[in-house]
Amino acid sequence: MKKEFVVIGLGRFGGSIVSELIELGANVMAIDITPSKVDEYADIATQAVVADTTDESALLSLGIRNFQHVIVAIGENIQASILTTLILKEIGVPKLTVKAQNEYHKKLLEKLGADHIVRPERDMGIRVANNVLSNNILDYLELSDDHSIAEIIVDGRVSGRTLIDLNIRARYGINIVAIKRQESIIVSPQAEEKILEGDVLIVIGSDLDIHSFEKKFFH
């Protein structure tokens, strides 16, 4: 059975979620208060609806409570985002992901019980900053305020050495959870695994430890 989602707010962020979910084989109800935005996704989403999601009766009439996961991607209108989130929680939506505009908005959403809160502009800013700061960091994903996952490409200074030789966990407090090697991926690599030039290390740890490791070996 296909997974079913509702995406509320069809700006660039919400629209990209709709398109990707459809591409991945999910059923998606796309909702926005602006008819022109809904028209854009009429031929993409499983169902595209014009509705005011701050109106509880409108949400109930759409059968929103029957969906397992609702994503609130409303853009600039923080009031609409908060009211929509409140109503969705009150009618018992099982899982709720909400886009936050700023830290204050995020805190309010947490108090309302949103299951997952995303800040795409901030998150992308962090990723871009880390990518441009180092030629070796390919990607950077925050897990919390001070812990992240990073992809670090190996150059000649580290290649040919084993994980046990580098002793990364003991020295830097980070874990190598996988190694990307061309088209393959080595999950939970053994201590005797030799690192090759061009490998991509997928590491997890505190931001401070990740940057200490990256500066030590790749600067």
Image (spheres, rainbow, N blue to C red):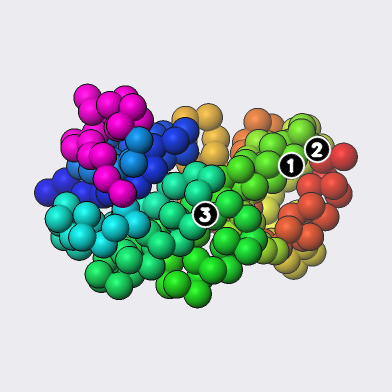
Rendered image quadrant of residue 142:
bottom right
Q: Amino acid at mark 3?
A: Ile
Q: Amino acid at mark 1?
A: Asn
Instruction: Look at the image and tell me whether residue 189 can be seen.
Output: no
Q: Which residue is mark 3?
A: 78
Q: CA distance from mark 3 to mark 1?
A: 29 Å
Question: Which label number is shown at residue 130?
Answer: 1
Q: CA distance from mark 2 to mark 3?
A: 33 Å
Residue 45 position within the rendered picture, expressed as x and y whole percent measured from the top left: 24, 34
Look at the numbered disc 1 and give the secondary structure of its residue: helix
Question: Which label number is shown at residue 133?
Answer: 2
Horizontally, is 139 left or right of 55 in the view? right
Look at the numbered disc 2 and give the secondary structure of its residue: helix
Give whichever of 72, 27 is nearer the camera: 72
Horizontally, is 20 left or right of 44 in the view? right
Going from N to C along the chain, the mark reached first, 3 or 1, is: 3
Q: Mark 3 and 1 residues: CB-CB less than 8 Å, in contact?
A: no
Horizontally, is 92 left or right of 185 in the view? left
Q: How many marks?
A: 3
Task: Magenta stretch: give its range.
Answer: 35-52
Residue occupying image coordinates x 22% and y 54%: 58
Above or below, 204 against 49 in this view is below
Instruction: Look at the image and tell me whether residue 42 can be seen.
Output: yes
Residue occupying image coordinates x 69% and y 32%: 197
Q: CA distance from mark 1 to mark 2?
A: 5 Å
Going from N to C along the chain, the mark reached first, 2 or 3, is: 3
